[in-house]
Amino acid sequence: MMAETFDHHPWTVQDLVAGVTSGRVRLPDIQRPFVWGNAKVRDLVDSMYRGFPVGQLMFWENAGAEHSKTIGVGEKTQSGSMQVVDGQQRLTSLYAVVKGLDVLREDYSQERIVISFNPLTERFAIPDSATKRSSEWIQDIREVFTSPIAARRDYIQKLEVARGVERLDRDLEGEIELAVNKLADVLKFVFEVVQLKEHVSRETVADIFVRINSQGVTLSSADFILTWLSVFWEEGRQAIEDFTRASRFTPQEMTRMDRKPVSWTPKNPYLALDPSHVLRVVVAVGNRRAPLGDAYNALRGRDPRTREIIPEHRERELEKLKNGQARALDPKHWDEYLKVIERAGIRTSAMVTSKNAVIYGYALWLIGRTEFSVPVDELREVMARWYFMAQITGRFSGSPETRAQEDLNRLDGLERTPQAFKGAISSQVSTILTEDWWTVTLPEDLHTSSTVGPAYTGYIAALTILDADVLLSTLKVKDWIDPSRRPVKGVEKHHLFPKDYLKQELGLSSVRQINQVANQALVEWLDNIKISSERPSTYWIRQVEDKGIAGDRLRRQMWWHALPPGWQSMEYQEFLQARRVLIAKVTREGFKKLSDPNYRPQAPTERVEVSAPALPSFEELVRDGVLPPRTLLTPTNAETNSIAEVTEDAMIRLNDVEHRTPDLAAQADGADDADGWDYWTAAFDEPVALSELRARPLTVDA
């Protein structure tokens, strides 16, 4: 039986390359893209040079060219009679280095793979500046495969010139000749090829391919489904690949590359698609499955109880998939969905913290539009709120397939009306974004230095929704992060308490503390340069005066950018804590505007008490006699047994070192993230925390 299915044949590298060049050896669509890095190609050549085993190949004797595509990017002269089942990476590698022709990478770019060789040390390398400067390297081994004699002659002449001799030592020339000839003999290296007979069915070939690759972890469930599609619906697989490729290029670029008019592509500012992204949408919409492993078994028609393949089940699942794909690849649906992402305040790919939120959001959008008939404008609003929720909460950061299946299941059994769909989505959003989430969880999530995390990008998205100004500017945030803009320098994240000020004046060294997101705001680049390392109480007043910003406009900007009243005179840790709360409030206002297009955020003048007095500084407490010199300070919660003392100069002396603020003294005592005002207690007759002492109204003797 085995002999009727396959047999063995030896193929030299030269035969293999000639077969690929002519088109006789072709790559079937069930194969994967070329994903090897150049280092693996180098190692393959090195192994063959040294006569090491490099594994066998597997071909299928099938002349059906409609089921295959060529390796490389050139035109072929023969129809294919051998299709590669296993060994694509090795075969493509050999073809690339021997012929010196471009291959297609995963991102559909073209690349020429070049490997260098040193005949003196018999080493192979990927060309870099060192090898290119050295006369000891043959820069491209293709020269040897093309003409060993010419390559050896040119190499020796180059070496003679570099060494300043008329002729190299005869023994050295002999060593070079042996090494170059040995490299040329790589073309004679023999691969053992397992050739499947022509009568073997495509389903059997696909099953063999899956079995071979499932022994390791090289393939995902998406790869298995795409393999399955190549057998049972090849045009569908090709449509997914075409959609994916087109998502990386504009219509103008596609027209130029394909040499035919292209009027539309799915290219967008948020996500460069790959086949697994598109497949997830297709399967979720058509087959109502998020786990691709489950979807693969269902598509094969495997009965979950008996584990037998039932053709009727397979056909039923394939029809569902076809239906889902027709909807997912419809340009009008894709374009309308992209408006959801923009409506949610997302402007660029840098603001997308979860690709899965984009992908599964599209699946839900398609179901709402095509099955529940939700009007486009209403669907845009409800899905924008869902997307905002999914991104800012990191909904798909763990077990994304499980989460997505929960979202799909929530729609089961609903009446097919717009109201039912909108109600289900809105209920999910409100269940997750509770009052506690906004007032407790989100401020805590903002205790981070990551400006690309869900919490901070959610705040930036809210600023675009609220049509906020850049701080100290007439420019809009949404305009300056528009993907169509290409300024040399635009808006930057500015440290409100400048980095050098925190390091030099406050003695902070923790990058995490210095770069807290609550210490950053969007300002114009030139303003950032001017601000430099000045203390906030110095530059803020000057910047406000220079810009002529006052009244309602200043209050609005302070509200948008979550600046507490008197922030410039606050202690650093106190400022961070206050601003996290305000950032969360502004983010919530942006979300509320998503919930109601006519919603107007509460007036900044009502939210920000600009005239409210700032709490006194430590120096002011000492100066006014509230905290007399020589007062002893101890940790409030007895974290340590330390005892500090207030000095005449309004400093805190701890272990013979003086600190300007309670925060710095707390950090010196090992409490890096503590609020120094809460950390220290004054040892009066009745001990009192500095934060409580600071909040007491100042009394003056008559």
Image: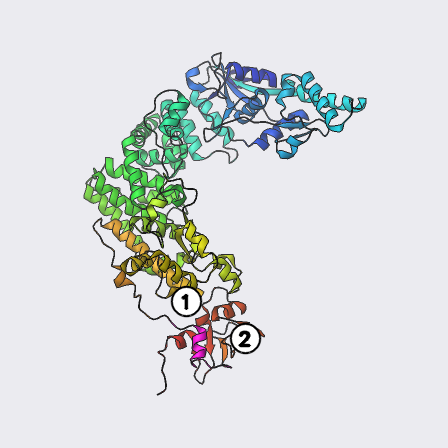
Q: Is residue 619 magenta?
A: yes
In which image quadrant can residue 434 be found?
bottom left
Residue 189 visible? The answer is no
- The x, y position of residue 246, in whole percent, is 38, 29
Task: In the rendered structure, find residue 126 and report the number of the disc placed on it.
Answer: none
Q: Which mark, residue 653?
A: 2
How far across and down, in percent of the image, does residue 582 sit?
34, 60
Q: How busy is the neighbourhood of tag 2: few (under 14 within 10 Å), some, or many (20 plus)?
A: some
Q: CA distance from mark 2 to mark 1?
A: 21 Å
- Find residue 587 and report its horizontal and vertical position in percent: 32, 54
Identity of the residue drawn at 48% across and 19% down: 70
SS of the residue at dot 2? strand
Any magenta on residue 580? no
Question: Where does the magenta region start and end?
Answer: 615-630
Residue receiving disc 1: 570
Q: Say which amino acid is labelled 2.
A: Arg
The correct choice, above or below, for 320 with respect to 430 in the image is: above
In this view, the residue in front, 39 or 153, is 153
For the point 34% across and 40% down, which residue is it?
A: 360
Helix, strand or loop: magenta stretch: loop
Mark positioned earlier in the residue sequence (2 or 1): 1
In which quarter of the view is residue 382 placed? Answer: top left
**Residue at disc 1, secondary structure:** loop
